[in-house]
Image: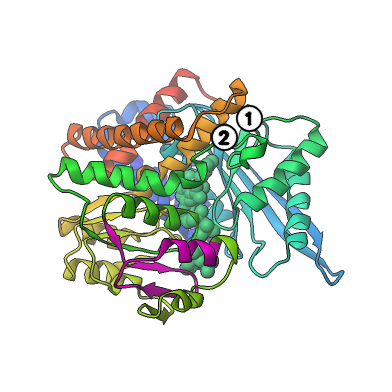
Amino acid sequence: MSYVDEVYERIVRENPGEPEFLQAVKEVFDSLKPVVDANEDKFRREALLERIANPERQFKFRVPWIDDKGQVQVNTGYRVQFNSAIGPYKGGLRLHPSVNLGIIKFLGFEQIFKNSLTGLPIGGGKGGSDFDPKGKSDREVMAFCQSFMTELCKYIGADTDVPAGDIGTGAREIGYMYGQYKRIKGVFEGVLTGKGLSYGGSLARTEATGYGLLYITEEMLKCNGQDIKGKTVAVSGAGNVAIYATEKAQQLGAKVVTCSDSTGWVYDPDGIDLAALKEIKEVRRQRLTEYKNYRPNSEYHEGKGVWSVKCDIALPCATQNELDLEDAKTLVANGVTAVCEGANMPTTLEATEYLQKNGVYFLPGKAANAGGVATSALEMSQNSERLSWSFDEVDSKLQGIMVNIFHNLDAAAKKYGMDGNYVAGANIAGFEKVVEAMTAQGIV
Ligand code: NDP
Ligand code: 2IT
């Protein structure tokens, strides 16, 4: 049996009940076969795959807090410090009832390669909790965030581990967490990114993941002789990534016709009204059922179905495994040209394969959504030098990083004879830098 298959079997045996983590490992390991097979003795002797698929350490902790009725609630908190070969652990905090150790591990594992692809000195980590901010008062959210940080602060720091936002963790949550970290540790340092502009945040971080997704999509289309202008785009999600992907797509002259949340989806044949979407989601924190009040011509549908809409480009920006084989078949039947992942692992392995086999340009999340963490790293740089850069300065650096990522993964795919396979290209390009650093640093 090949070394790659051997290690994958071991990972499966040792991580029962963690399907998302195994899915992420399988995708990466399958891509790495040509690289590892070409140098199998070295990889096996140094146990490089066992080391890269096992977190350096992981924390699981109790998070007690008191709700508005005086009832004590208990959630579980996690931080997985996956790989620090190329820099301090970096990655978001997810607050969603579905969070468990396997989900955090899948996200942390993906983060290693994503962060490497940015070209910036950041290692891979991820954390979060099964706390659901939805429907909670501001005071309840603050109580949870303070309790969560009271434990988390023992493990993080500006030069060791720098968390940020993810699903359910936005500016409000980061603010409460930052305040508690500062209170306990007594230092004002860049320990979190995605901070408010008044206390060390970076301009363009809010927009970065969505904007970055469009910058890399535009570059990929351009290199394949196509223009994004005039294209019809289907976006899923209605959170941070979806909103700013929609904004940039519109700025580039595309027409975005959908958005979704966990209860349903919207089709707006005239193009999504971004001001209405921001008002509903960012200001009022309401459900998408409200959208029809702003746009009577639009349709609201309960449940899943956003991928049934005819589009040229699909941008899944909600959550993992939200685009399955059936959805892929529908998209292909409707003539989709490109699928670019704003979310982390939103496309199942079968769906990815189907899209690739049918000639659809497919950009995986670890490349396509890397603009968020890249801009977080730029926030870290600004905090270190105690300066703030202008919006245009950050945005143009972000643009350069995304264009670079595309060319690096394109070149890696070509180097191993897999021209156009951007999944393999991203995994290989991300992996090579981390492995070089791990090898140089010895057995640690
Ligand atoms: P938000 O919390 O801002 O928004 C998430 C959106 O996805 C909401 O519309 C939410 O709907 C929907 N959603 C979440 N879970 C589900 C689910 N189980 N089923 C259906 N819809 C769901 O998160 P972000 O926009 O920040 O994150 C979206 C994705 O992008 C995630 O995969 C995240 O890991 C990834 N990502 C985020 C980055 C960032 O900088 N924020 C960077 C890189 C990747 P509802 O409100 O109804 O739950
Ligand atoms: O998945 C991700 O890359 C994020 N949620 C952003 C992480 C970060 O540190 O900005």
Q: Nearer the viewer, residue 421 or 333?
A: 333
Residue 423 visible in the displayed image: no
Q: Nearer the viewer, residue 293 or 358?
A: 293
Side of 143 where 437 appears, left or right: left
Residue 58 visible in the displayed image: yes
Query: Magenta region: which residues?
Result: 254-281
Tell me the crowding category of disc 2: few under 14, some 14 to 19, or many 20 or more residues within 10 angstroms, Cα based.
Answer: many
Residue 241, image x, y percentages? 45, 53
Up/down of 309 relative to 74, above or below: below
Residue drawn at point x = 22 percent, y = 51 percent: 228
Up/down of 83 relative to 247, above or below: above
Residue drawn at point x = 39 percent, y = 74 percent: 266
Which numbered marker is on residue 160? 1
Residue drawn at point x = 81 percent, y = 38 percent: 183
Looking at this rendering, what residue extends furthest in the right direction?
Answer: 70
Q: Is residue 3 magenta?
A: no
Side of 322 where 190 appears, left or right: right
Element on which disc 2 rests:
strand
User: Ligand 2: does it lie within 8 Å of the C-beta at label 2?
Assistant: no
Element on which disc 1 rests:
loop
Q: Quadrant of the C terminus?
A: top right
Report the amino acid beneath label 2.
Tyr
Q: Are marks 2 and 1 in contact (CB under 8 Å)?
A: yes
Residue 154, image x, y percentages? 75, 37
Residue drawn at point x = 34 percent, y = 42 percent: 4
Up/down of 15 relative to 238, above or below: above
Q: Which residue is mark 2?
A: 89
Gap in angstroms between the C-alphas marked 2 and 1: 6 Å
